Amino acid sequence: MDDNTRTELEAATFRALVAHLRERTDVQNIDLMNLAGFCRNCLSKWYRAAAEEKGVPLSDPQAREIVYGMPYDEWRKQHQKEATHEQKAAFAATHPKH
C-alpha cells in the first residue's frame, strides 16, 4: 500500500470514528476514558497537536468543535451527564494523574 492510500484510509477511518462518537451522545467521555483510556477531548487534543506539527494554527475550542460537531459548551449542555460515584471511582483508579 502506498503512503497516499494509507493516509486516505486513515483519514476516512478517523472521520468514521468522529461521526460514530457524534451519534453516540449517550456514551459519556468518562465511560470512554474508563474503558478505552481516551475520549473525545483526547481526540481533539491529538488533532490540534497534528495541526501544530504541520504549522496550522488551531485552538483547543476549534479542535473540540471539529470532534464534537458543535461548540464544546453546547455539547456539554445537551449531552453531558453528571458522573456517578462508580464512574468517578473507576476513573480515579485507572487515571491517578488526572
Image (cartoon, rainbow, N blue to C red):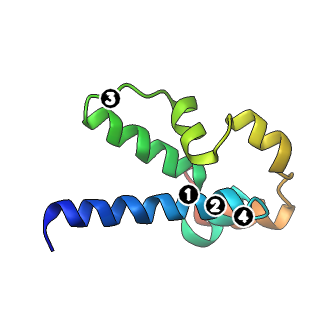
Secondary structure, mark 4, is loop
Decide which of tag 3 and tag 4 comes sooner along the chain.
4
**Which amino acid does the dot numbered 4 rest on?**
Arg
Secondary structure, mark 1, is helix
The reply to whether discs 3 and 2 touch (Cβ–Cβ < 8 Å) is: no
Mark number for residue 56? 3
**Which amino acid does the dot numbered 2 rest on?**
Leu
In the image, what residue occupies the spot 22% across and 65% down?
5
Q: Hey, which quadrant is residue 56 in on the image?
A: top left
In the image, what residue occupies the spot 48% across and 58% down?
15
**Above or below, 85 relative to 48:** below
The reply to whether discs 3 and 4 touch (Cβ–Cβ < 8 Å) is: no
Disc 4 residue crowd, few under 14, some 14–19, many 20+, Cα 10 Å: few
Image quarter of the N terminus: bottom left
- Report x, y in % for residue 88: 76, 59
In the image, what residue occupies the spot 84% across and 40% down?
77
Q: Which residue is mark 4?
A: 24
Task: Please tell me which residue lies in front, 64 or 41.
Answer: 64
- Mark 1 and mark 3: Cα distance apart in space: 20 Å
Q: Which residue is mark 2?
A: 21
The reply to whether discs 2 and 4 touch (Cβ–Cβ < 8 Å) is: yes
Task: Please tell me which residue lies in front, 64 or 6.
Answer: 6
Secondary structure, mark 3, is loop
- Is residue 33 among the parts visible in the rendering? no
**Which amino acid does the dot numbered 3 rest on?**
Val
Mark number for residue 42? none
Q: Hey, which quadrant is residue 69 in on the image?
A: top right
In the image, what residue occupies the spot 56% across and 70% down?
36
Decide which of tag 3 and tag 2 comes sooner along the chain.
2
- Mark 3 and mark 4: Cα distance apart in space: 29 Å
Mark number for residue 18? 1
